Image (cartoon, rainbow, N blue to C red):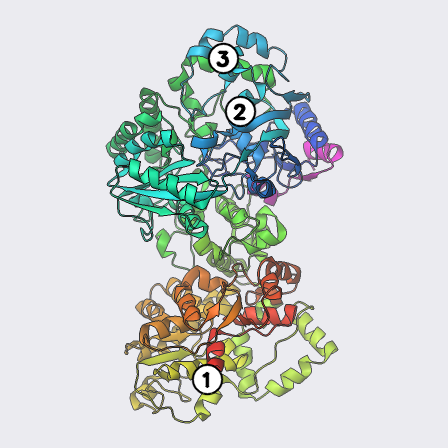
Amino acid sequence: MTDLEAALRGAVRGEVAFDVTSRALTTMDASNYRRVPLGVVAPRDADDVAAVLAVCREHAVPVVARGGGTSIAGQATGTGVVLDFTRHMNRLVSLDPGARTAVVQPGLVLDRLQEAAAPHGLRFGPDPSTHSRCTLGGMIGNNSCGSHSVAWGTTADSVDELTVLTARGRSLRLGPGWAGAPPGLRELVDGELARLRTGFPDLPRRISGYALDALLPERGADVARSFCGSEGTLGVLTEAVVRLVEAPRSRALAVLGYADEAGAAEAAAGLLPLGPLTVEGMAVDLVPSTRGLPRGGAWLFVETGGDTEAEARARAEAVVRAADVVDALVVADPAGQRALWRVREDASGTATRMPGGAEAWPGWEDCAVPPARLGAYLRDFRGLLAAHGLRGTPYGHFGDGCIHVRIDFDLLTAAGVARFRRFSEELADVVVAHGGSLSGEHGDGQARAELLPRMYGEETVALFERAKAVWDPDDLLNPGMLVRPEPLDANLRFSVLPRGPVDVAFGYPADGGDFSAAVRRCVGVAKCRTTSAAGSSVMCPSFRATGEEEHSTRGRARLLHEMLAGELVTDGWRSTEVRDALDLCLSCKGCRSDCPVEVDMATYKAEFLHHHYAGRRRPAAHYALGWLPVWLRWASRARLAPVVNALSAVGPLAAVAKRLGGIAGERHVPRLAGETFSRWWRGRPAPTGGGDLVVLWPDTFTEHLSPSVGRAAVRVLEAAGLRVALPPTLAGGALADGRTRAATALLTARRGRVCCGLTYVSTGQLDRARAVLRRTLDLMAPVLETPAPVVVLEPSCAAALRTDLPELLHDDPRAARLAARVVTFAEVLERHAPDWTPPALDVPAVGQTHCHQHAVLGDAADRRLREAAGLTGELSGGCCGLAGNFGFEAGHYEVSVACAEDQLLPAVREAPEGSVVLADGYSCRTQLEQLAGARARHLAEALAEGLEGS
């Protein structure tokens, strides 16, 4: 233990962490920069903060305050001690609806404040797109804004008082009228009044530099306002009194379509006199799909408010009439508005990938110019991009003249980094020429502080240095930010990654086969750190269960980054730190769809486990659960199902078996079916019918554990007029029309049964998975010679065939052909029996959309089928928590239950009487049975029961 660590442990009641994992998790924020801290402290209160400052001052170690870690300019990283306020100092201390104020701690997430204020008709005005995970302390440190700043201003406009600790441990309560000013600050300002009155651009989004002009006497000498945007360099915030605004009772959204970005930009300022709540802009090159948007090549999202829906809509329609648009859309429905806003909020992540898949990075994320100059600025900006051979997709707060953009800088080579510097310097000059600010929302950090002399001049920047010295004479707080900055091209987080290819098993087609590029996908916007899964979203169930950064998608990606870097995590694929962080990853694949940059942690986990255990003994659960298809086939062939079921019902025997197999003692061993699905298939009467041929995939779970699902699916598919066949095997069931045994199929079929390899993939046994999948492709050769779709009833198996198969066997063209054939139960009915009418069930439905279906397959066809059958209500999002082998493994039970309690179990408990519980996944049905005593049905079972009752 170092002297610093020992001193901190002796002085602080909160957690002190100098371990590799804690440090690795805080090396980066959402910027291009990386710094390795000495340690991380989670203070419990202001006394702890003061103790940390005293110890670090004695050891001459810098201190960096950190909230949600979503800063985009690098100011939430540092080489000393990082203060993590999200663990303990995260409370809403009080809320006074009458005064419209709230007292908050710095680690409070913005959405928690909004939730508390909403019942009183109030809200905090600023709302960055990271509102579900950014903290009030970080917002004050960066003077954050958000989409509603045209109505409610920046964070500085919403601050009444701030309680801060100076680097030398003095507690100050900052406010107007010089309240809380440290000694020397007033004298500094009085000597520079002329400079403060003339040296600061007058625009709504001037965030760059210190807001020393807020200390002018005519502006109330507001020390709290001046402190906002200081990026943790002047003092450490411990509490804040913030102002709330009255939230409109109703809102409407006018989406205005323009021919191009310039047209939208030039129109934005003209809409401000109408008093909109937002004027947000984005162009077509940022939108994955224009479905639901009006015609055009660019759009303004203009939100209006009112006491009634009619009033809000009328104001939105007035905006449409005043705007010269190609097309327009007014949406008053809250759900419709949320769907449209989600497109805008995800832009910060979506913009990190160019349309062709190339990476794009921040660095010039939020320059701002006077709104009337925005159109001209964007033309110059686009011209500069072209001159440097760069591409970017501007979007953002058009009404405030603030533009966000990610640019495809090459930050991996010396030449690319040099161009990054040249472009940055030239763009700074363009911004200044238009009367703008280098930062309009996210702060300067390391990304822009070096260029502040171009905006303010050397003398004003020298004044900033003098102000910093007044507050922090020892330069203890976040050194290298704002004043005496480090170069904008130093500490780039990509510089530590390997330059050569990393030997991996998966193909990573979206990343050019480069595992480093796959890991680089995580830019740190931290959508995975949300504490509630909104709507149907899934990501990230393990973080919601534990609240620990290392169990978030971002945290795991950071550890993989450090593993590749080899500086902090030094044992590569053998790393126990990475292994432990991935251990609670459910492989739900939620991040593959919910993460704006489609980080695929389930694949990365499988890759890591493959290498981590190469040539070594694996955990017992990998053998017991990973090889489940083998064990179940053996039991079936030996007709041992009754024996296994009887033995598993004997408590002591079951306990021993679970202990040996690495299975959680709290779990019940599922019963094996007395008759497998394929055995039932072989003994059924020959079907009739002449519709389209479909091949029904007999997955392991349907075959051995829930054959009722397979039988129900056959019943429904045949009722819809389809001919059903099973994949060929030498034992029978050859591909044909389901009535005959085609000789050619028998001759070409090989011994064995098809398998998607899911259990081997999820446990990282990728060599075995590849062997199983190659055998499957051999067996499926006759199917691939026909146009028949392959219907997969188990969503996790369908997802494995759609994604894992072609990514693991990227060298076998048959893999992509089979993946393209895979359809879900609802999809095959919609595509191949479009005129079939399902039975009218007319009951409420509850349950959960399978996480793999949400992430990989999509559930639009399922929604339409449920609606056609009269199954009303929405299925919940999230993950059931069992997640295949995860919930059965020893040590995972509590997290598994917590995930189920997030959405699924409450939805089932609160279901109306007579509801049908739907769960297409075997894991989901098992979780419901074991935790809630509820019998859930596959959609095929519900429809089959309807057919029998009709």
Is 588 above or below relative to 14? below
Q: Which residues are magenta?
A: 1-26
Describe the element under mark 1 as helix, strand or loop. Answer: loop
**Residue 9 percent coordinates (x, y):** 73, 36
What is the crowding at mark 2: few (fewer than 14 residues within 10 Å), some, or many (at least 20)?
A: many
Where does label 2 land, which residue? 230
Camera-nearest label, 3 or 1: 1
- Residue 618 visible, this angle: no
Q: Residues within 10 Å of mark 3 (few under 14, many from 20)?
A: some
Residue 251 percent coordinates (x, y): 45, 43
Q: Earlier in the sequence, mark 1 or mark 2?
A: 2
Left or right of 210 in this view: 99: right
Q: Amino acid at mark 2?
A: Ser
Q: What residue would you read off at disc 3? A: 463
Look at the picture and state if 337 lies above or below 85. Answer: below
Residue 718 percent across, percent down from the top left = 38, 84
Quadrant of the rendering where the N terminus is positioned? top right
- Callout 1 crowding tier (Cα within 10 Å): few <14, some 14–19, many ≥20: few
Image quarter of residue 625: bottom right
Q: Quick one: SS at disc 3?
A: helix
Q: Secondary structure at mark 2?
A: loop
Q: CA distance from mark 1 to mark 2?
A: 70 Å
Q: Amino acid at mark 3?
A: Leu
Label 3 – label 2 distance at C-alpha? 14 Å
Q: Nearer the viewer, residue 372 or 722?
A: 372
The x and y percentages for residue 45 are: 70, 34
The label number, if any, that marks residue 950 in the structure image: 1
- The amino acid type, in three-letter code, at marker 1 is Ser
